[in-house]
Image (cartoon, rainbow, N blue to C red):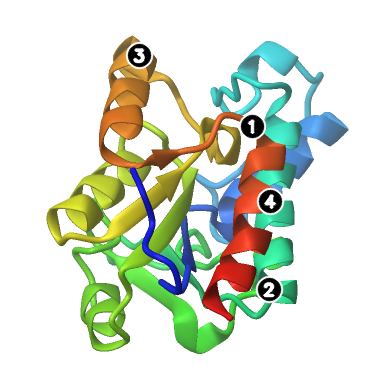
């Protein structure tokens, strides 16, 4: 898929939440957070089992490597003054889950962080914001590759937006082994980037194209 010259790029981070980051850190350090108790929950000693790490998958390394790929991609976009948005799932009660993770808050202004009640980030007020700003070129990264990220990408494509994707910036629970189907959709309907270096070069080159 070709991108028209001068078409500015924006970045959207889906469902990389504060709870998500806290659980990752806890499990890496050998304890768990019991969210069934009254918020903010209890910290429980436990032995670390890497195979149970949030039940997440990152096909290109550890879960931490995938998390860092999302953070670093966002940081690079921020340094290049590319507009960045975030959308977090909110089910009506607050335990911090709907907040964009702390590592991302440095790079995403609060006014650009949105709550969504459905899988797709376009099923929120973010959709009208992007329409108002005439966003036609959007890189989508985050979690879950086969659910919220996929639903967001499908909605963006249906709206005629040129979407940029890379599995290197997506984490997943890999439910129902949908990886092949997801990648096939990305490759057919989006600008699909094969490596993390490709992602970062694409972001940098988008600034040059926009000049």
Say which residue label 1 marks: 195
Which of marks 4 and 3 precedes in the sequence?
3
Q: Is residue 40 visible?
A: no
Q: CA distance from mark 3 to mark 1?
A: 17 Å
Q: Position of residue 113 (x, y in %)?
A: 46, 76
Q: CA distance from mark 2 to mark 4?
A: 14 Å
Say which residue label 3 marks: 180
Say which residue label 4 marks: 201
Residue at 32 percent across and 45 percent down: it is 148
Quadrant of the image containing the N terminus:
top left
Residue at 19 percent across and 64 percent down: it is 123
Q: Position of residue 25 (x, y in %)?
A: 77, 43
Q: CA distance from mark 3 to mark 4?
A: 25 Å
48 sits left or right of 183 in the view: right
Q: Secondary structure at mark 2?
A: helix
Say which residue label 2 marks: 78
Residue at 68 percent across and 51 percent down: it is 201
Across the whole image, how many numbered discs are drawn on residues?
4
Along the viewing direction, whichever of 65 and 54 lies nearer the viewer: 65
Which of marks 1 and 4 precedes in the sequence?
1
In this view, the mark in front (2 or 1):
1
> Looking at this rendering, what residue extends furthest in the left direction?
158
């Amino acid at each position: 898929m070709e991108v028209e010259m001068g078409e500015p790029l924006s970045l959207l981070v889906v469902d990389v939440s504060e709870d998500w980051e806290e659980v990752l850190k806890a499990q890496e350090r050998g304890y768990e957070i019991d969210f069934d108790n009254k918020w903010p929950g209890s910290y429980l000693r436990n032995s670390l089992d890497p195979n149970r790490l949030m039940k997440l998958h990152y096909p290109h390394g550890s879960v931490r490597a995938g998390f860092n790929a999302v953070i670093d991609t966002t940081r690079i976009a921020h340094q290049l003054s590319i507009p960045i948005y975030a959308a977090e799932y909110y089910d009506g009660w607050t335990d911090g889950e709907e907040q964009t993770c702390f590592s991302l808050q440095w790079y995403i202004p609060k006014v650009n962080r949105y709550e969504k009640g459905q899988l797709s980030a376009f099923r929120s007020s973010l959709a009208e914001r992007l329409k108002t700003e005439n966003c036609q070129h959007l890189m989508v990264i985050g979690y879950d590759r086969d659910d919220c990220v996929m639903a967001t990408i499908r909605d963006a494509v249906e709206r005629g937006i040129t979407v940029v994707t890379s599995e290197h910036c997506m984490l997943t629970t890999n439910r129902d082994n949908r990886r092949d189907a997801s990648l096939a959709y990305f490759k057919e309907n989006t600008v699909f980037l094969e490596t993390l270096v490709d992602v970062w070069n694409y972001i940098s080159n988008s600034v040059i194209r926009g000049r």
